């Protein structure tokens, strides 16, 4: 849990469920909050915010580094979170949300100038996917076609309210219309 999210298909999931109460107590002593979302099949810890932390925890150092995501990775998070939202509303039969990189490229291109090189855009998308893979937001599927599973931690990290705010901030600029 200190290294990242634990999913229901990971080896440690049963241990997290079995020892949930002692784990919560342990992490609370060091200023961390254990979040176990059984319906979504994930567990993770996060640092208590200044408002959540009791007075005796006020001077604890941060145990987790905050990593600012660049424009590309933030944009990909927003696109994937939106894809996950639609998946949950429409596809009730499948448990895994899978997106192909080629399919997502069309949405990706709309956030960049139309004169941008498509090969370069494809490479920046691949780089953003790899960054999100290190954060365990996505998992590459075994095929060479560029399919990715969107992990449910993305839903916990970007709630719908924040998603709408980010979408407004990242909205593609409309190109000026040419006068005829």
Image: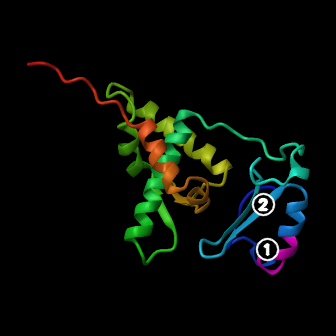
Residue 37 location, quadrant: bottom right
Q: Check residue 21 for magenta coloring.
A: yes
Residue drawn at x 60%, y 59% is 156
Residue drawn at x 48%, y 42% is 166
Direction from residue 4 to residue 125 in the image, left or right = left
Residue drawn at x 12%, y 18% is 179
The answer for how far apart the CA atoms under marks 2 and 1 are is 14 Å
Q: Quadrant of the C terminus?
A: top left
Residue 110, how many percent across, how many down? 35, 37
Report which residue position mark 1 lands on.
16
Q: Residue pushed farthest bottom?
A: 18
Helix, strand or loop for the magenta stretch, by majority: helix
Report which residue position mark 2 lands on.
33
Q: Nearer the viewer, residue 86 or 132?
A: 86
Residue 43 location, quadrant: bottom right
For discs 2 and 1, the disc positioned in front in the rendered view: 2
Q: Nearer the viewer, residue 133 or 141?
A: 133
Name the disc covering residue 24, or none.
Answer: none
Q: Is residue 131 visible?
A: yes
Q: Residues within 10 Å of mark 2 (few under 14, many from 20)?
A: many
Task: Tell how many labels.
Answer: 2
Residue drawn at x 40%, y 62% is 86
Region in magenta: 16-23
Q: Residue pushed farthest front?
A: 55
Q: Is residue 145 visible?
A: no
Residue 159, how many percent across, how many down? 54, 56
Along the polypeptide, which appears first: circle 2 or circle 1? Answer: 1
């Amino acid at each position: 849990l200190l290294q990242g999210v634990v999913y229901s298909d990971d080896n440690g999931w049963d241990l997290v469920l079995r020892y949930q109460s002692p784990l919560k107590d342990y992490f609370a002593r060091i200023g961390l909050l254990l979040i176990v979302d059984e319906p979504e099949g994930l567990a993770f810890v996060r640092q208590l915010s200044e408002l959540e932390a009791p007075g005796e925890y006020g001077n604890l150092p941060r145990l987790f580094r905050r990593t600012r995501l660049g424009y590309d990775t933030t944009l990909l998070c927003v696109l994937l979170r939106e894809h996950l939202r639609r998946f949950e509303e429409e596809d009730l039969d499948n448990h895994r949300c899978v997106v192909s990189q080629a399919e997502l490229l069309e949405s990706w291109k709309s956030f960049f100038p139309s004169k941008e090189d498509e090969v370069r855009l494809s490479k920046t998308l691949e780089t953003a996917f790899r960054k999100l893979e290190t954060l365990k937001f996505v998992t590459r599927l075994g095929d060479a076609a560029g399919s990715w599973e969107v992990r449910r931690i993305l839903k916990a990290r970007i709630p719908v309210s924040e998603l709408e705010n980010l979408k407004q901030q990242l909205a593609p600029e409309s190109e000026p219309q040419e006068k005829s």
